[in-house]
Amino acid sequence: MRKLMQQAQQMQEQLAAAQDELASATFEGSAGGGVVKATVTGSNEIVSVEIDPSVIDPEDPEMLGDLVVAAVNQAIKNAADAAQQSLGGLTGGLDLGGLLG
């Protein structure tokens, strides 16, 4: 029983370290062939949005908004995929109630 508790504690420490590492990592997404790029952290905070001036059309602001949303969503998906890949191996397939994204 003691050995099982030690293994659980070790897994918990590894999981916490991996979560900290992911939270500080950045992930990029892009849309429109790269004219809009978004960067988020592993904790899904938007760090930056870069917009190529050629895509700014005062007559069609909705298109720019759609590109920004698509780029941010792609960056968040990339972060979630990395979390699943990194943390999934540590949990051994345990259901952590959505903690992995």
Image (cartoon, grey):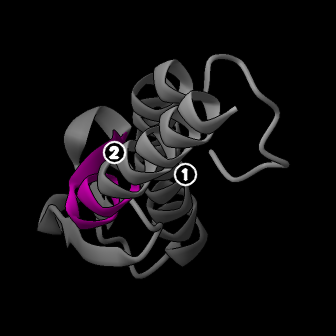
Mark 1–mark 2 contact, CB under 8 Å? yes
Q: Which residue is mark 2?
A: 29
Which of these two is toward me, 7 or 86? 7
Which of these two is toward me, 31 or 97? 97
Q: Quadrant of residue 85?
A: top left
**Residue 88 in view (yes/no):** yes
Vertical arrangement, residue 62 with respect to residue 21, above or below = below
**Classed neighbour count for the residue bearing mark 2: other residues with Cα under 10 Å, few (<14), some (14–19), many (≥20):** many
Give the residue displayed 85% in from the left and 48% down from the top.
Answer: 97
Q: Which residue is mark 1?
A: 73
Amino acid at pointer 2: Gly
The residues bearing labels 1 and 2 have C-alpha atoms spaced at a distance of 7 Å
Amino acid at pointer 1: Asn
Give the residue displayed 62% in from the left and 45% down from the top.
Answer: 100
Q: Secondary structure at mark 2?
A: strand
Q: Magenta segment range?
A: 19-31
